[in-house]
Amino acid sequence: MENENKNAEIQEEYQAKAKGFFQSTKVFINDLLDIRTDSDRESTLEAVRRDISFKGHNAWILIFSIFVASIGLNVSSTAVVIGAMLISPLMGPIVGIGMSVAINDVDTLRKSLKNLGIMVVLSVLTAFVYFKISPVTEITPELEARTYPTILDVLVAIFGGLALIVGKSKKGTIASVIMGVAIATALMPPLCTVGFSLANTQWQNAGGAFYLFSINAVFIALSTFAVAKLLGFPLVRYANSKRRRRTAQIASAVAVIVMIPSIILFINLLNKTLFETKAKDFVSNDIRYLGAEVLKQESDFDNRRIDIYMIGKRVPEGTVATWRAKLNEIEALKESQLIVHQNAEDGGNLDQLSSQVRSGILEDLYMKNQEVVENKDAKIRLLEDQIKRYRTSLFDFESLSKEAQVNYSEIKNLGYSNQVVTDFQKVDTIPTFTITWKDKVTATEKENSRKKFENWLNVRLQLDTLNVKSAN
């Protein structure tokens, strides 16, 4: 009985300690992540409303920043584009939309939508004018990257918007947070891409770029809405209770109208990314046949289709049927078509493929080989530069020449260079010194002095191999 009581006391003690540990952990996490106590709601609302206004200085800043961003995109310079985003005032109206919907402020919502529309039109018009007069009309990688949204763009907009409104709600201004979000969410480059596409009549790219801008703007506004609700920003009060209810209904309707398409879009982009990733993994891991090789793969999420182009030994239909059965076992790839393009007979003759497929394959192979060659060339240049720097850093030539002048008065001029030599088995770089002797020095004296000078250099520089030769 006594042992049972003792065990019960020990158990109660452990339970009390565990409860205390969890309680202290809860308090620690709450103190660590709580943003309510350090939030300044009134100052935040005032700052948001102040940033919505778009006229005068803000208009010119936007125009100049669009020009800078367009130049950066035109020459594919990431640094220039980032510089333009730092000075862009595009964030204000978007945050204003999210905040106004959260607090039922119809007047601020109307003002935010109006200023956002003006900003978008002015931005696209400025970019259109620049790209219309720009001599560079080819689409650069920086421009092409802004022609369609991905799931990563949506995630960046969500978390960037959250960081922005949390930063704005803190007591005091966090400029670095605001600028960092401006860079991350990249609102300007898509609008510049719209201007480029319109200037070059690329309607599909223009639509895709504007789509990307809309996605970023919507999710930044939604993030602002969510944080404002979480922090309990006070609703705007109206003297007329009927107007207050109508305002709340309008704000709620706007929130639902924005949120439903955004959620659908997010799910679609997530499914597309998952489909493309799983398709790539499937081709890499499961499409294997001895004597045949996959040269190219294309995934079409909209049509649920995966095309693979193979060369070498012809794959039997039974094997292809097995691949298709495996494909349907993968949840993300169910009901997808697997189309295998291969030559009509065994062998690796590219001529048996269609001209379009053949040109695509050859282009991919050329680009891959070109990339490999460029990487190797870059490594070779890097190694050569390092060897050159290593050779020249072995000694101070100016100091060495002064010592040589003191020790060998018969020398008129002294030269130094690295000589690249080969025995057709390997290539080596040898430090080479060239001596110009004074006129009165005889041939015998020249040779004797040259040998002595060479021995002195070997000791002085501690080199295993070097070359000393006479210029006269």
Image (cartoon, rainbow, N blue to C red):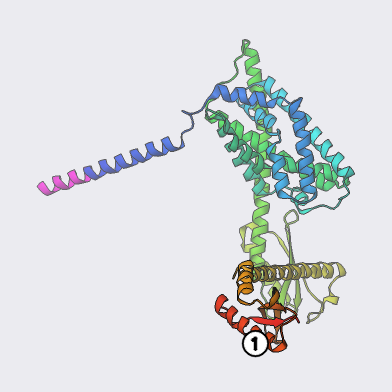
Measured as percent of width and height from the top left, residue 229 is found at: 56, 29
Foreground pick, 238 / 180: 180
- Residue 103 visible in the displayed image: no
406 left or right, relative to 213: left
Q: Quadrant of residue 334?
A: bottom right
Q: Is residue 7 magenta?
A: yes
Looking at the picture, how far across and down is residue 296, in whole percent?
74, 68
Task: Report which quarter residue 45 is drawn in.
Answer: top right
In this view, the residue farthest toward the front is 440
The magenta stretch spans residue 78: no
Query: Overall secondary structure of the magenta stretch?
Result: helix
Q: Residue furthest top?
A: 239
- The residue lying at 66 percent from left, 53 percent from top is 273
Image coordinates of residue 178 in percent, x first then y, are 61, 36
Q: Nearer the viewer, residue 281 or 162?
A: 162
The magenta region covers 1-12
Rendered position, 321 above or below 225: below
Coordinates of residue 453 in the picture (x, y in percent) = 62, 81
Q: Is residue 153 visible?
A: yes
Q: Nearer the viewer, residue 19 or 116?
A: 116
- Can you identify the residue that label 1 sits on? 448
For the point 10% across and 46% down, the residue is 2
Compared to 350, does 139 lie above or below?
Answer: above
Q: Amino acid at mark 1?
A: Asn
Q: Residues within 10 Å of mark 1 (few under 14, many from 20)?
A: few
